[in-house]
Amino acid sequence: MYRRKVILCEGAPDYCLESNYESVPYQCSGRGHRGNARFFLFIAEKEDEGGADELDLPDKSRVVYYYRDDDFFFTDEDTTLRKGDEVVILTSSEHLAELDKRWHPHEVEDED
């Protein structure tokens, strides 16, 4: 079972969100980036809850929008992320490895 599900997106995030999360990390192809700008998506867990500006992201990285209950919302200074939100970060390609390490899926034992 995956504790976290992450998508590294080299293209438009909506292409990535239609993908099967079980195949993560997933590289999208598309025309949704320019230069070194990249989208990075992850599913928020309990420890990610709180203000979007409290995620301690690298330079040139910002939460731009998120999905909750199949609707998308732009972030602002009052945005509070909740477990299960699909969070979309716009970042520089140089930070993808760092973000991937932080939110990379790994297997954990069921806590049943």
Image (cartoon, rainbow, N blue to C red):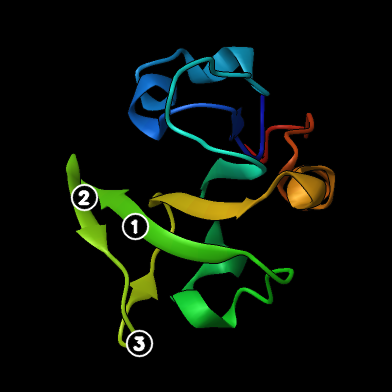
- Of 99 and 1, the residue lying toward us: 99
Q: Amino acid at mark 1?
A: Tyr
Task: Identify the residue under disc 2.
Answer: 72
Q: Quadrant of residue 108?
A: top right
Q: Amino acid at mark 2?
A: Phe
Give the x, y percent position of residue 97.
83, 43
Marking on residue 77: 3
Verify CB contact (< 8 Å) between mark 1 and mark 2: yes
Camera sees residue 37: yes
For the point 68% across and 23% down, the residue is: 25
Quarter of the figure with the C terminus:
top right
Q: Is residue 53 above or below residue 21?
A: below
For the point 72% across and 72% down, the residue is: 59
Taking the image as shown, residue 28 lies to the left or right of residue 81, namely: right
Compare marks 3 and 2 and give the one earlier in the sequence.
2
Please, what secondary structure does the residue beneath circle 3 have?
Answer: loop
Verify CB contact (< 8 Å) between mark 3 and mark 2: no
Please, what secondary structure does the residue beneath circle 2 have?
Answer: strand
Give the x, y percent position of residue 32.
43, 31
Mark 3 packing: few (<14 Cα in 10 Å), some, or many (20+)?
Answer: few
Q: Amino acid at mark 3?
A: Glu
Q: Is residue 8 above or below residue 96?
A: above
Task: Identify the residue under disc 1.
Answer: 65
